Image (cartoon, rainbow, N blue to C red):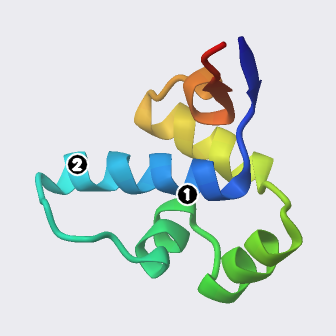
């Protein structure tokens, strides 16, 4: 079963994409996520605090990086 991912889950997915792109095991910071989404760090922090998802930025990222929008925005739940 699939459900909409929370902003926290999406940020974690983006961190994985960044780490793979950098070929790095280092912890990815949220400033890097904001830069990847081409939004300010403060915008990401406010969005996260409100539990909102910046859909336009995420969809643009998925298109640019050839990432599945479904995989980014949906989370698989086990029964």
Residue 36: x and y, percent? 47, 62
Q: Which of label 1 and label 2 is nearer to you?
A: 1
- Could you say which is closer to the camera, residue 17 or residue 2? 2
Q: Residue at x 63, y 29 (%)?
A: 75
- Toward the front, the furthest residue is 79
Residue drawn at (54%, 36%) of the image: 62
Quickly name the residue at label 2: 21
Determine whether, in the image, residue 11 is placed left or right of residue 4: left
- Count every numbered label the image shows and give the total: 2
Q: Quadrant of the N terminus?
A: top right
Residue 12: percent from left, percent from top = 48, 54
Image quarter in which the C terminus is found: top right
Across and down, in percent, residue 46 comes to 79, 81
Number of the label disc, if any, that sits on residue 50: none
Classed neighbour count for the residue bearing mark 2: other residues with Cα under 10 Å, few (<14), some (14–19), many (≥20): few
Q: Residue at x 88, y 72 (%)?
A: 50
């Amino acid at each position: 079963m699939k459900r909409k991912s929370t902003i926290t889950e999406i940020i974690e997915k983006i961190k994985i994409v960044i780490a793979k792109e950098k070929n790095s095991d280092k912890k990815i910071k949220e400033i890097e996520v904001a830069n990847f989404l081409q939004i300010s760090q403060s915008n990401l922090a406010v969005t996260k605090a409100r539990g909102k998802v910046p859909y336009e930025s995420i969809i643009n990222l998925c298109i640019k990086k050839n990432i599945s929008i479904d995989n980014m925005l949906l989370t698989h739940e086990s029964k």
